[in-house]
Image (cartoon, grey):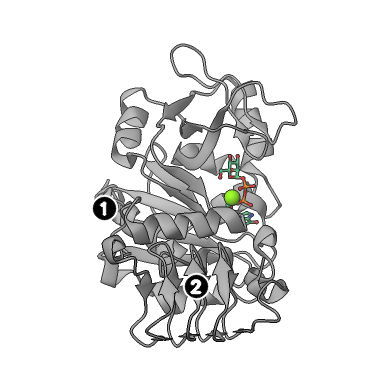
């Protein structure tokens, strides 16, 4: 069909969550637009999706929806087509997928890639797409192993890789294999999700599909994976990007040999300040004499007084850190 030729590889990026675990940083900036590795987090996902062949992307937005379009525009600078589906009232992950899919002009068997908007991973999306196609699955879930699965969707599979259950946030996980937050759906399966109501893809859609005997399979990839939804994970992901431990086309790694972090050209950093290789100092920020900044993100326009030492912190944009408050809540965490 002609529309299939137009959009051979369509995707939806879920970026409408409230980001509560990252408050107060998410009071004015939605989680996907927080700087990670020196750039808004979503940029890493957009460039990775493009590199894997995605040429049509719908951002499913709700909370602070208005900030995405000014940054990503119509997608032409990424050689892709980007549009924005806004939920006036957040519809949950399933409702968000359904609402965004209305933007995609593709037929029923065509695959749609769905990304959680807060996952940094090295997984091979092309291989996941091939696996989806060759086994004629209805849904193919990217799965990974973690030490503690309690905060995630627990997903046991059988010996052939078909999903046996989807158990969102179990107190006593029955396996450490989890939903890593990237799904491929047949378009027709998305069409079955109810419109205009809150639906959780994890708590409702996946269990229902399994009950109905749909072909839901796991694509296991145990490479680099992080959900950046907590302060510690976001800061660690940023350090991984600037040190080059995780390679992203959106971040130029700092020169770890000289021990210098990633410093924006417009930032003012005293010559004797020490910024370690895992840190980022953003536009217009100031770092005073004898400061030590370790594994931290210094937000846009923040000012750090002489002699301050910070470690594993996200200094809120435009905030001022003094010797008195450098252990206080102004750091964000
Ligand atoms: N459009 C839209 N609307 N997006 C939403 C909504 C909504 O109402 N609610 C959440 N999202 C987006 C978030 O912005 C995020 O990108 C994604 O959906 C997942 O939401 P989180 O709040 O980050 O969920 P989680 O981390 O607790 O759990 C999810 O991710 C884990 C992997 O990181 C689940 O999918 C788990 O099963 C999974 O293991
Ligand atoms: Mg998350």
> Residue 66, located in which quarter of the rendered image?
bottom right
> Residue 170, located in which quarter of the rendered image?
top right
Closer to the camera, 246 or 55?
A: 246
Closer to the camera, 323 or 44?
A: 323
Closer to the camera, 321 or 47?
A: 321
The 10 Å Cα crowd at callout 2, few under 14, some 14 to 19, many 20 or more, is some
Describe residue 107's horizontal placement relative to residue 309 as left or right.
Answer: left
Residue 51 - label: 1
Q: Position of residue 258 (x, y in %)?
A: 28, 66
The 10 Å Cα crowd at callout 1, few under 14, some 14 to 19, many 20 or more, is some
The CA distance from mark 1 to mark 2 is: 37 Å
The answer to whether residue 196 is visible is yes
Q: Closer to the observer: label 1 or label 2?
A: 2
Pick the quarter of the image with the C terminus: bottom right
Residue 292 - label: 2
- Residue located 38% across and 58% down the image: 241
- Residue located 49% across and 86% down the image: 288
Q: Position of residue 62 (x, y in %)?
A: 61, 66
Describe residue 323's horizontal placement relative to residue 119 as left or right.
Answer: right
Of the numbered discs 1 and 2, the one sitting upstream in the chain is: 1
SS at mark 1? helix
């Amino acid at each position: 069909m002609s529309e299939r030729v137009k959009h051979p590889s369509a995707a939806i990026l879920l970026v409408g969550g409230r980001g509560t675990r990252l408050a107060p940083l998410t009071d004015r900036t939605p989680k996907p637009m927080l700087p990670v590795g020196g750039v808004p987090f979503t940029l890493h996902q957009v460039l990775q999706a493009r590199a894997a062949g995605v040429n049509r992307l719908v951002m499913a937005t709700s909370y602070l929806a208005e900030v995405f379009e000014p940054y990503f525009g119509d997608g032409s600078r990424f050689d892709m087509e980007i549009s924005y589906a806004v939920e006036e009232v957040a519809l949950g992950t399933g409702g968000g997928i359904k609402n965004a899919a209305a933007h995609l002009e593709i037929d029923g068997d065509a695959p749609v890639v769905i990304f959680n908007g807060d996952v940094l991973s090295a997984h091979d999306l092309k291989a996941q797409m091939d696996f989806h196609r060759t086994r004629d699955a209805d849904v193919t879930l990217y799965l990974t192993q973690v030490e503690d699965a309690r905060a995630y969707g627990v997903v046991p599979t059988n010996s052939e890789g078909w999903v046996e259950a989807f158990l969102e946030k179990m107190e006593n996980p029955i396996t450490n294999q989890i939903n890593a937050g990237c799904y491929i759906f047949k378009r027709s399966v998305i069409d079955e999700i109810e419109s205009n109501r809150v639906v959780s893809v994890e708590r409702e859609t996946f269990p229902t599909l399994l009950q109905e005997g749909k072909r839901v399979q796991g694509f296991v990839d145990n490479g680099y994976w992080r959900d950046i939804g907590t302060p510690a994970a976001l800061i660690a992901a940023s350090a991984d990007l600037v040190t080059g431990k995780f390679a992203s086309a959106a971040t130029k790694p700092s020169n770890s040999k000289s021990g210098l972090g990633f410093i924006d050209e417009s930032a003012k950093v005293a010559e004797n300040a020490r910024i370690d290789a895992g840190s980022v100092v953003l536009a217009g920020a100031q770092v005073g004499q004898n400061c030590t900044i370790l594994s931290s993100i210094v937000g846009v326009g923040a000012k750090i007084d002489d002699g301050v030492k910070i470690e594993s912190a996200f200094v809120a944009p435009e905030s001022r850190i003094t010797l008195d408050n450098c252990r206080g809540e102004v750091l964000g965490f």
